[in-house]
Image: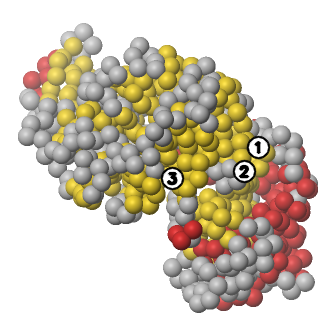
Amino acid sequence: MLAMCAASIVCVAADKKKVQQKAIPMGFDNMSFAVFYHNGTNIFELKGKPLFEGRGIFDLKLNPSNTAVATLQKDKKGRTSVVLNDINPSHPESRRSFPIYKDKDNQPMAIAYSADAKRLAIAYANQKINIFTPTIKVIGATYTSALVPTKMVFSDNNYFLGAAAGRSLEIWNLDKGTVRKTLTMESNIRDFCFSNQSSNLMVLTADAKLFIYDTKTFDLLYTIEDLGEAIACVPNNNGKYAAVINNDKLISVVNIFDPSERHMITDEVGGITTCRMVYHESKGKHYIIYNNFNSIVYEEVEGLKPYYNQMMTTQLNERMNQWMKQMPGESMADYQLRVNDSTRVQQAQAIERELATQMATGMLESSEISVGNYNPNTRSLALKISNMPDILIGVPMDEVATFGDGSKLQFRNAKYALNPDDKFELVYVEVFNPENGKTYVFDNLQRKSMSQLTMDTDFVPLEIIQKSNMEETALMNIKEDIFNLAKQENLLSDKTHISVQTGVVNAVNADGQRIINYNVDFTYEVEEEFSARDDFKPGRYHVEESNAAMIMLKIMTKAFENDFAKYMVAGKQVKIKVKGSADASPIHRALAYDGRYGEYDGEPVYMNNELTNLSLTKKDGIASNEQLAFARALGVQNYIEHEISGFSEMKRDYEYHIEVSKEEGSKFRRISVQYTFVDAF
């Protein structure tokens, strides 16, 4: 713990967990709390077990789906190569290493994995950048850089690849294969990273500065100074904070909106070269992982504030999307009277104030209040609030003396708002002065709200909202027709509930242009006592073996043959999120897999929204409920590819989400699909 801290600095006194190592961790990479490191010669797992022998390792990157560790290595003659080291836990006995590129005349210089594990970028001394597909190890694209990159990083949204050397940083638009922006700094670039929401780019330079850029425009937003030797930087889970290695014994976690808030982490051993920030979802705690000369260290970072504007935006969008839907039984005339440009602004402001006031609960009570200056010309008195901006209230001159030092004032009916720097401010409050029994009102409700400030870029035009509403109604009619026919044919009971939904979402493309994405969702649930009849039976995964799944897919097919066919445009992108579920019924002996959906080795999938990998082969069959849920998801993909022809000429990006219940029961065996048509309008 630090002995002394400046008033603007927060000292960290949280417990540390040091995992001692026999080898010196010279660099590491992680996926959540899982760490793999190197000592310049070998690759080790966290428990210190050496996994692979190398030679001259000087960089290490972990595949985000936990299937491989890629290393940059240098041999005795100084020639570099990229080596993939298989760490797939499903077959530990067959782990192997193999060079993916080795050429004495064209040396690899930098490597990077994309966040979804679907791409591996390798930069070479001849200024070429190859984009590999790791699962099949083929080159998908080649870029020619103006640099010889020594560091590369993908953005989480897969829009960008950053490539840096010296004072220059190229930002590549991955969709077009062109350079979107080149930044030239005043000092050498030590490190750079994209925020975990891809909204910002952070660039750390040798003159101890961290520059924050907006990835929509690549305009400079903030500059943070006094960062010591400026060794490396990483964002936290929401992009409000950046951890910077100041020197080999000191890390500072900095609020990018308010750099005076710095959480200092010291290490008496020294040798820090790498750090990562990890958020523990169930505990609601932030941790930093770093290396020193003899350990991998996990330390909780206390006192980090939530990213309030991000929380606000999420909740505001959800509530506004619901409010803008046409209600059951509401006529079009009534709907247009309730939902128009004027009422939408008012509703957004009201929801925003409500949410901000909920988030700021207790702030006034914990504030120190004092009386500031009085302006006799405007007859306004300043009240100073220790943790928020000052407010001005109208007070006659002969009443100023009754305010004293402000300690006795009472505040009632407070309403709050958030400013762009993620801080709360009062927009309305009634100030009661017990000395004279009078109430003074501070009213700034007409201030321009965050929703107004972002309205031009973040609000979907009403005509598109109304179009989505009408199409959802049409989709529900298709559902009812097919569902009723299935019941008449005794394929389904009325205990199966199929849901269809549409929605529009604002987004920005890799060129920084505003686009609108269109979501179309298909889900179903079956009441428990009827799920064994209508849905998958234990151990079954063929999509044809679930009447509920097949009826949902028939509704989907009919929709894309009719009303929604216009969104299936050749060359456009559609993201298809397929969820497969399974219950906790034990699989005592591997189930046979007939290979009808293909064979997969270390395929990236999401479990509980965290990226991992699954394998599925005829040889090994289905030995876990995770594999069973994966097979069900693959059945949906297979159906889409073979039965809905309109997708064949679109850029299809499948994302598998696997869900395994902790409980047994057929109601936990189901599938769902979400389509996101990118730039649909």
Neighbours of disc 3 within 10 Å: few (<14), some (14-19), many (20+)? many
Neighbours of disc 2 within 10 Å: few (<14), some (14-19), many (20+)? few
Q: Along the polypeptide, which appears first: circle 1 or circle 3?
A: 3
Q: Is residue 588 above or below residue 273?
A: below
Neighbours of disc 1 within 10 Å: few (<14), some (14-19), many (20+)? some
Mark 3 or mark 2: which is in front? 3
Name the amino acid, label 2: Asp
Residue 69: mark in rendering: 3
Which residue corresponds to mark 1? 573
In this view of the protein, can residue 473 be seen by the observer?
A: yes
Name the amino acid, label 3: Val
What residue appears at the point 13 percent right and 35 percent down from the top-left corner?
5
Residue 653: mark in rendering: 2
Q: Along the polypeptide, which appears first: circle 1 or circle 2?
A: 1
What residue appears at the point 15 percent right and 44 percent down from the top-left corner?
268
Going by the picture, which residue comes out furthest to the top? 377
What percent of the width, then of the height, locates residue 456? 61, 28
What percent of the width, then of the height, locates residue 542? 78, 77
Q: Quadrant of residue 249?
A: top left
What percent of the width, then of the height, locates residue 679? 74, 38
Q: Along the polypeptide, which appears first: circle 3 or circle 2?
A: 3
Whether residues under marks 1 and 3 lie with C-beta atoms below 8 angstroms apart, the answer is: no
Task: Report the Cα–Cα distance between label 3 and label 2.
Answer: 24 Å
Q: Is residue 626 above or below residue 331?
A: below
Name the amino acid, label 1: Gln
Whether residues under marks 1 and 2 lie with C-beta atoms below 8 angstroms apart, the answer is: yes
